[in-house]
Amino acid sequence: MNLKVLFHINEARRWQMVFTNITNFINDVGPGNAAIEVVANGEAVTIFADNSDHGLLLEEMQKLAKRGVEFMVCRNALRSQAIDEGNLPSFIKVVPAGITEIARKQVEGYAYIKP
Amino acid sequence: MNLKVLFHINEARRWQMVFTNITNFINDVGPGNAAIEVVANGEAVTIFADNSDHGLLLEEMQKLAKRGVEFMVCRNALRSQAIDEGNLPSFIKVVPAGITEIARKQVEGYAYIKP
Amino acid sequence: MNLKVLFHINEARRWQMVFTNITNFINDVGPGNAAIEVVANGEAVTIFADNSDHGLLLEEMQKLAKRGVEFMVCRNALRSQAIDEGNLPSFIKVVPAGITEIARKQVEGYAYIKP
């Protein structure tokens, strides 16, 4: 089994749930047995704002990135929230439009999950 | 690329997010390069109630309909909210059950997105 | 037509919506014409807590189970909420990780719906 899963998040309050879901998923299928991508758009990107009080969440995000989870952020959402791309952690990738990324990944066989 | 995307909305407060998502998506892939459908069920259909204060949202919906976005509304939800189908904007299509429409579109290769 | 649909629920307040969606769906396609599975994780599993005041919802769930709807509950979520598996209704199946179940079902051709 090599599952491919895309997690969609558009609300900042759901980041912890996303991380818990991913951690449980990796523990269940085993490291390296799944391709996991997170696409963040809408208000979820405020976790990257300068005045964000989400240091612990960003640490958890980084740990998952080191385990191979890919984190994609919507450029439209960043602009809408006035967040400078230069301030993003280095493991974050910016995509022009989050919706396009979500649609393309489903075409590539990724399962869609909205925690 | 000719992406097919279905947006599912069941909460009225999320209409603006749906419209923003769709607009960003069309701007990204280019007009005519994607098939886009919105299925509304549950409380989301209250946007069509007589006493709804959602005129600006309905204008935005109509603009997207003119750009080719299809809007489908669940008949069960309309009945549950006591909304007369005759009052719906002419570009809206009513389906017997929103869930059936969502399932069928995924079978047809539409990506599912829940803003 | 033999549609396969997976409903994902992770918030207890959405159980009624899930049941309504499923009932409308069965009424639309006809009994026996769809495979329906519900996967519950996160806070949604509190419906099974001892002190839960959700007797009517559990009755509705049982009625749907008798009509062939499968209900799967995430073990991680049960542990997180300190809910004893022995207290679950007999028609409930426990899976090691809800996310894995959701991903696998989509690979099997199930449409994903998040009410």
Image: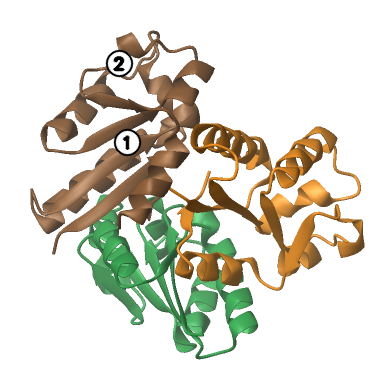
Chain colours: A green, B brown, C orange
Chain ID of residue with mark 2:
B
Residue C8 shows in the view: no
Q: What amino acid does circle 2 point to?
A: Leu
Location of mark 2 (residue)? B88
Q: Looking at the image, tell me whether mark 1 or mark 2 is earlier in sequence order.
A: 1
Residue drawn at x 28%, y 57% as measured from the top left? A99
- SS at circle 1: helix
Please tell me in which quadrant of the rendered image residue B19 appears. top left
Location of mark 1 (residue)? B16
Chain ID of residue with mark 1:
B
Do the residues marked 1 and 2 share a common chain?
A: yes
| Horizontal and vertical percent position of residue C62 | 78, 43
Residue drawn at x 45%, y 63% as measured from the top left? C109
- SS at circle 2: loop
| Horizontal and vertical percent position of residue A87 | 31, 72
Q: Nearer the viewer, mark 1 or mark 2?
A: 2
| Horizontal and vertical percent position of residue C110 | 48, 59
Residue drawn at x 32%, y 69% as measured from the top left? A105
Check disc 1: other Cα within 10 Å, few if <14, some if 14-19, many if 20+. some
Please tell me in which quadrant of the rendered image residue B90 appears. top left
Is the residue B104 above or below the residue C110 in the image? above
Tell whether B98 sits left or right of A76. right
Q: Nearer the viewer, residue B93 or A45?
A: B93
Please tell me in which quadrant of the rendered image residue C55 appears. top right
Tell whether B38 sits left or right of B81. left
Check disc 2: other Cα within 10 Å, few if <14, some if 14-19, many if 20+. some
Can you name the residue that lies furthest to the bottom here? A32
